[in-house]
Image (cartoon, rainbow, N blue to C red):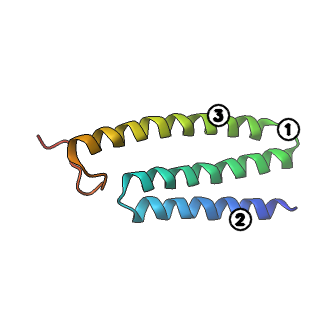
Amino acid sequence: MKLNFFLVLSAFLFSVGIYGVLARRNAVMLLLSVELMLNGVNIALVAMGVMVGNITGQIFALFVIAVAAAEVGVGLGLILLVYRNKQAVNVDEVDLMKG
């Protein structure tokens, strides 16, 4: 397969993720959208690494996966904490900076 196919797929996933971040107000959906964006970046990194002929893109993709796993762990922990305190995960309804 050609490199263009993978780059178009990567751009599509990243665009869907950006749309999800901008349009959704549920905190869990925001996390899922960020994961879509990171997966789009991973596809681009691996495709470019294969094009160049070394494993650097795959190594960077592994680091991105590790950061994504940590982000999900911390993000879900924060969402659970906010839900316990406010009984809502809607980003517009939660304003913790007000006393």
Which residue lies at the image location 63% right of the left edge and 50% below the top edge?
39
| Nearer-N-terminus badge (3/2) | 2
Residue ID at (70%, 63%): 9
- Quick one: 30 or 46, which is closer to the camera? 30
Total residue callouts:
3
| Above or below for 15 versus 63 | below
Left or right, residue 12 beside residue 94:
right
Circles 1 and 2, Cβ within 8 Å, touching? The answer is no
Say which element carries label 3.
helix
Residue underneath mark 1: 54
The mark found on residue 8 in the picture is: 2
Q: Secondary structure at mark 2?
A: helix
Instruction: Check disc 2 and give the amino acid type.
Output: Val
The image quarter containing residue 64 is: top right
In the rendered image of this protein, does residue 50 appear above or below residue 9?
A: above
The answer to whether residue 88 is left or right of residue 30 is: left
Give the amino acid type for the residue marked by disc 1 in the picture: Asn
Residue 1 location, x and y as percent? 88, 61
Task: Please state the horizontal and vertical placement of residue 7, each as a whole percent of the image.
Answer: 73, 60
As drawn, the residue found furthest toward the left would be 99
Q: Nearer the viewer, residue 68 or 6?
A: 68
Quadrant of the image occupied by residue 79: top left
Quadrant (top left, top right, bottom left, bottom right) of the C terminus = top left
Name the amino acid, label 3: Phe
Image quarter for residue 29? bottom left
User: Closer to the observer: label 1 or label 3?
Assistant: 3
Query: Dot 3, how many residues are within 10 Å of its Cα: few (below 14), some (14-19), or many (20+)?
Result: few
Left or right for 74, reference 68 = left
Pointer 1: residues within 10 angstroms few (<14), some, or many (20+)?
Answer: few
Who's the residue at 21% across and 48% down the image?
Answer: 95
Residue on which disc 3 sits? 63
Q: Which mark is residue 42?
A: none
